[in-house]
Amino acid sequence: MNITEQIEDLIECKASDFEISKLFKNYITTYKSSLPELFEKNQGKDFLVKHTKSLDKIIDLMYKTVLRQMFGTYLPMRSSIPIAVIALGSYGREQLCVHSDIDLMLVFEASEGYNTDAILEKLLYLAWDAGLKLGHRVHEVKDLLKASREDITIRTALMESRLITGSTFTWHATQRQLNIIRHDDPKKFIIAKIEEANIRRKKYPFSMQPNIKEGTGGMRDSQLLYWIANTIYGLDSIKELSGTLFSDESYRQYRMALELLFRVRSALHLITDRQQDQLILEHMPQLTKMLGFQDDTKMSRSVLEALWRINNFSQIFLTKMVRPYFYKSDLFAVYKSARLQKGFYAIDGQIFATYSQSPQPINQLLELLLDLEDKPWTFDPSFLSKFTYAQIKHPFNVKTYTLLRRLFQREHLYSFLQLFYDAGILHQLITPFKKVLFLPQFDGYHQFPVVLHSIKCVEALENIREPFIQELYTSLSAKEKLLLKIVVLLHDSGKGRKQDHSDVGVKLIGVFAKKLKLTESEQKTAALLVKHHILMSTVAFRENIHNEKTLYKFMSNVQGAENLKLLYILTYADINGVGPGTFSSFSSKLLKELYFEALDISEQSLRITDAAKRLIIERRIQKLAAYKALPKMVQKKTLMIESNLFFFKNTPEEIINIARISRDIKTFTYTMKMENGLSIEIMRKVPLNLSYLLGKLNYMDIISMEVFTLFDNIKYFKIDFLQAPSSDLYESIREIIEDSFDMSLSISLEHPVIHHQEISIDCEHSKAYAALAVHTANQRGLLAFIVKCLDDADMHIATAKIDTTKKRARDHFLIEKEAHMCDNSKQLITLLTKGKN
């Protein structure tokens, strides 16, 4: 038994309103549960139309039921009852989404013969009790004009009226009123709708998680286009303007974009089981599957492109409709002095164009931009249309690249880049953008797709709010500003590939920079900046910026103070281009500190070169299976070892082995080797009485000694002796080593002769270390004596490098500054020289 027969049975049995509404509610629930299956078969506008028609049948059946209940067997012809049930808004357009409000207007004409109030009240209660989400209005036909004047929203809804059921006579009377409303001060209505749209678009700007309905390029923009066309031309569909206002191809692409939004919005409603109009990240996997896209990125990219297309189409052709309607005569007749050239005008900082001109070559349009004063400009949609439909031919000739270079040389480039993007030609002019157009960035950090982020970075560069960074930027030469602006725009152009985007970006900017006639040196700088464009923020926010190893490693990549300045400004622009509020006072402080810390050491080219050399060794170590077998924490600590010399003196395999042994040390461990002389390796966590050890073994000549601080308070010592002792001394040497961990032991040492001029102390060697060099005659017990003097002065060796020949000793030490070496340097010299001059 179908629902109509069931209702009839309930009415015959005098069933209560509750029982009838319950039957409708169950029917509606069953229908809603079938919507996912319907969506699989019919997506886009087709799905919305079928859903709308189904609701029409339900509401029509409700109205019949109410009339049957109230009139019984004396039911008059439906056209005789002066009531019309009318669909409004998206329901009227047959675009009603699954969980959108069902906007109804119940229109009646007063008649003493019918109790219309009772009929309408009973219909509304039945719909509410059955679970329909109604938005409703009740009006007498003669009051419609008055109601439309009270609220622009009411007038807008009335424009999309559609009869569902009821009296055709009442509907015809309603249509006559609607025609009157359409001609009622239409200019005021158009202005109000455009102002309303501007407010809405600012509230819902273009983003990676767009509002499909209200956002820029969303369904509201499409509806605005219809409302204005209906007001001006009285059309039921903007399709009727195809071939006159816009081309068939433009309309076809616009309709395809709108169709995708219909699909996306319906899918969102079905997935969330509520009115969800924002495309947020958590829903994308399910949405991708429902819509049949290969992955989330492709789905999101298609949506962003659709929003762009609707925005572009609606802005251009809305203006094209409105301008002649508002200005029957030539708009620009009063602005003759503002004429730039035929068909183009500059008025109050905005560029306008006539719509009558045919598409122009891109070079001609670029020359027009270059003739403008170098300041920020805004562009009317009429001017936007000239770039949207410009004649662009590839490959570009030399003149085009010359014009682009001149654009980059301007102080204010941002507004032009935004114009190119809005016109859909940015990727044609700046070819590195071809593969990242509309590419989203779902990294939890960026707020805009790649290309929009890049444009906003240029905007940030041209509007620097940090006084110190602005001073740095102002100090740049014109060529440096050109180079930097290109880098800021293209730093992320390599995204969307499997390869690291910085590496891809290096290749892309290399080709583009060459076409813009940058020198080889400038091309190398541009490549370096793109390669390391996230380096400064990574180091500043994640690493110890006061650690020398960090700074030298950083500067080994940056390669100089000039590059550091450019990278600092680039980093500022990059962070600000992410979105409002991203660049905080905290991030500003860290970046500035890193800049000055790195600037301090930028002239120490030798140590920077060492840092670069060390990076190569680190990469070799990281590739070895033995390194990968180490615990992650040990891996990290190994690469954090301060001394570059440690990495230069040992092979990658030796370094890994030392790290592996060190992780298990509780007190100390040592090894002895007797091959071509004695070699002692010690790794200790407890203090080592080094002067005692060296003093006890001073009967042998030391040819080298290395001291390195590892990690977890572990120090590594390697002492090489020229002689190989006889085997019977092996155990005694072992005992000396083990006794050397008794800090109470001491030994009387001879006082070698060291002159004052043979000692040099560099307190500015680095922030953490001072350098001590002793170049003197080679003497028995010299090294043990120097170490004892350092111990007596309470100075701690971080690294030692001993170079001894038969006649001369060249001993170098790095001493921790925490031991106040520089404050006590005179005391140390006195100890070493025993007061000798």
Image (cartoon, grey):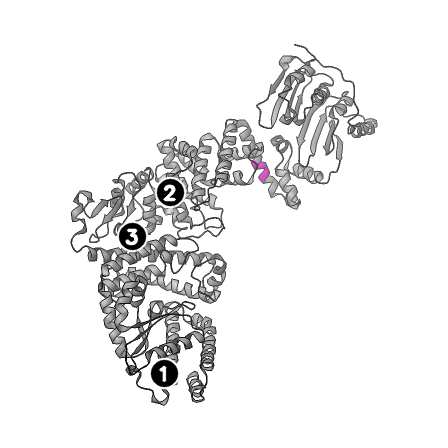
Front tag of 1 and 2: 1
Q: Position of residue 529 (x, y in %)?
A: 45, 38
From the viewer's perspective, is 298 left or right of 760? left
N-terminal of the two: label 2 or label 3?
3
Instruction: Report the predominant secondary structure element of the magenta stretch.
Output: helix
Q: Position of residue 160 (x, y in %)?
A: 30, 68
Q: Of helix, strand and loop, which one carries label 3? A: helix
Picture disc at residue 459? 2
Q: Quadrant of the N terminus?
A: bottom left
Front tag of 3 and 1: 1
Q: Residue type at mark 1?
A: Leu
Dot 2 surroundings within 10 Å: few (below 14), some, or many (20 or more)? Answer: many
Q: Vertically, is 610 above or below 356?
A: above
Identify the residue under disc 3: 388
Q: Vertically, is 737 above or below 509?
A: above
> CB of mark 1 within 8 Å of CB of mark 2?
no
